[in-house]
């Protein structure tokens, strides 16, 4: 999975991506009034891999409808939604067949 493919997914889904200085995180997914956007803190994303993992997770929020209000303080809800988004990103970043091959080749 290459990074350009993830940007292509965002474009296909009409998700705008912005460079935004976010103090405590690498990226956020925003959905407001049916407008979808991802803000990435490119200054914090030091490597290609960090950018790819962050973008995949933020797309996971979109695909899994794993959102919560910015003012949310319910840690259980936040953890649940973050888990759902990350799970989607793992499936996209590491397709099952690749994982299976890696496990088989380990022996």
Image (cartoon, helix red, strand yellow):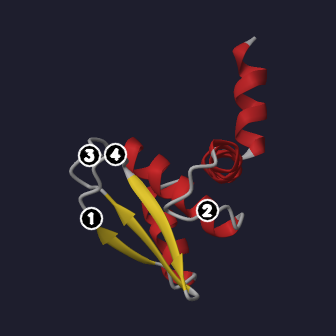
Q: Which mark is residue 44?
A: 3
Residue drawn where x is 54% and y is 55% of the image? 56
Q: Residues within 10 Å of mark 1 (few under 14, many from 20)?
A: some
Residue drawn where x is 71% and y is 47% of the image? 80
> Residue 8 versus residue 86: which sits nearer the camera?
86
Q: Quadrant of the C terminus?
A: top right
Q: Mark 1 points at which residue?
A: 20
For residue 65, side relative to residue 15 (left or right):
right
**Which x, y percent locates residue 33?**
56, 88
Between marks 2 and 1, how big is the CA–CA gap?
19 Å
**Which x, y percent locates residue 16?**
42, 79
Mark sitting earlier along the chain (2/3): 3
Mark sitting earlier along the chain (2/4): 4
Label 3 element class = loop
Residue drawn where x is 67% and y is 61% of the image? 66
Mark sitting earlier along the chain (4/3): 4
Q: Name the residue under label 2.
A: 68
Between marks 4 and 1, how big is the CA–CA gap?
12 Å
**Which x, y percent locates residue 9?**
55, 73
């Amino acid at each position: 999975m290459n990074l350009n493919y993830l940007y292509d997914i965002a474009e296909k889904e009409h998700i705008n991506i912005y460079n935004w200085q976010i103090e405590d995180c690498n990226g956020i997914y925003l959905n407001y009034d049916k407008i979808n956007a991802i803000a990435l803190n490119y200054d914090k994303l030091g490597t290609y891999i960090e950018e790819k993992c962050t973008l995949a997770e933020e797309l996971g929020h979109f695909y899994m409808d794993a959102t919560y209000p910015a003012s949310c303080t319910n840690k259980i809800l936040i953890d649940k939604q973050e888990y759902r988004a990350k799970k989607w990103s793992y499936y996209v970043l590491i397709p099952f067949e690749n994982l299976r091959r890696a496990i088989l080749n380990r022996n």
